[in-house]
Image (cartoon, grey):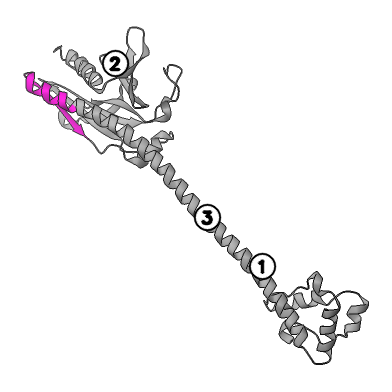
Amino acid sequence: MGALGYNTRAPVSRWKRANRPPSTGLRITEAKVRYLTAPLFSEDRQGAYYQALEAADGGDTQALTELLAKNLLRVADRYLAAIREVADKRIWLDSITKTAAEKVRETDHRRFMRWGRVVTSLRIEFHELAEQLSSNVPGLLVRATNFQGIDLDKYKILRQGGRAERTWIFGVDFRYETAALRFVFWGAHHYGGQTDPEPNLEDQPSLLISMEEQQGLVPREHKSYYRTLDELTERRFSLREIVIHQGRLLRRRHNPVLDCPEWDLDVSPGQVARDFYTEVLQSFQLA
């Protein structure tokens, strides 16, 4: 009985006079040695409990041992039920979190795939027209080049308004006689403004257009820099931004006469490519 913390030297009559069982001393002793506590339940605090104590004082510990064992099992069952509840909650939380994360990722992936299909159709139009112009216009060389583009992770960063590196999607180089122009179409976050024709255009990454600038007097020392057409305040080329919204293409152009942005809604990839190529050929006096 020593392991259970029962003190046979304490007379039973002392606990009876106090009308209180010696459960507190038992619990403290059991806690110190890391045993399960054996509390007394209300139904135990009757004559049977004191009879078991008196018998234990006389050397017969069987009744007290059975009572304590019964209560230990009841407490152990409660502990096990609590442990199972915590474990079940953890399993449920892990499962629902995993499912929710997969749903979010699946939604992002589907949205990314729709966005990517529109970008691909735009890129194909620029490539096909580049080949046709090079084949049909003497002295003109137009080359469209694909770059690394935007993966799902970069797409999500841009959607959330962050900055991502290496988001070039495709580029177009023009050469005619001694003149050369080089443009890059790259992914960026669209920052909405008062001139936006529709709400929530920033929900998808847009395509900005940058043009190469060369610095240095000697060709060998030329260094290439790319700046957006917005930054260059370029008047020869009106295209500034291509926004993909709900599977449609919206085009932001600069009106040099009014010196303000203009939006074209629901334009086709072919129209975007043809209008851009027309303006470049006009700068070469070929259109």
Q: Which residue is mark 3?
A: 92
Q: Residue 129: within the magenta?
A: yes
Q: Which residue is mark 2?
A: 238
Q: Residue pushed farthest bottom? A: 59
Corner quadrant of residue 107? top left
Q: Residue pushed farthest top? A: 257
- Label 1 to label 2: alpha-carbon separation: 75 Å
Secondary structure of the residue carrying numbered label 1: helix
In the image, what residue occupies the spot 28% across and 30% down?
119
Q: Is residue 8 left or right of residue 158?
A: right
Look at the image and tell me whether residue 217 can be seen. no
Secondary structure of the residue carrying numbered label 3: helix
Disc 3 crowd, CA 10 A, few/some/many (<14, 14-19, 20+): few
Which amino acid type is marked by label 3? Trp
Which amino acid type is marked by label 1? Arg
In the image, what residue occupies the spot 25% across and 39% down?
148
Q: Which residue is mark 1?
A: 78
Nearest the camera: 247 or 43?
43
Secondary structure of the residue carrying numbered label 2: loop
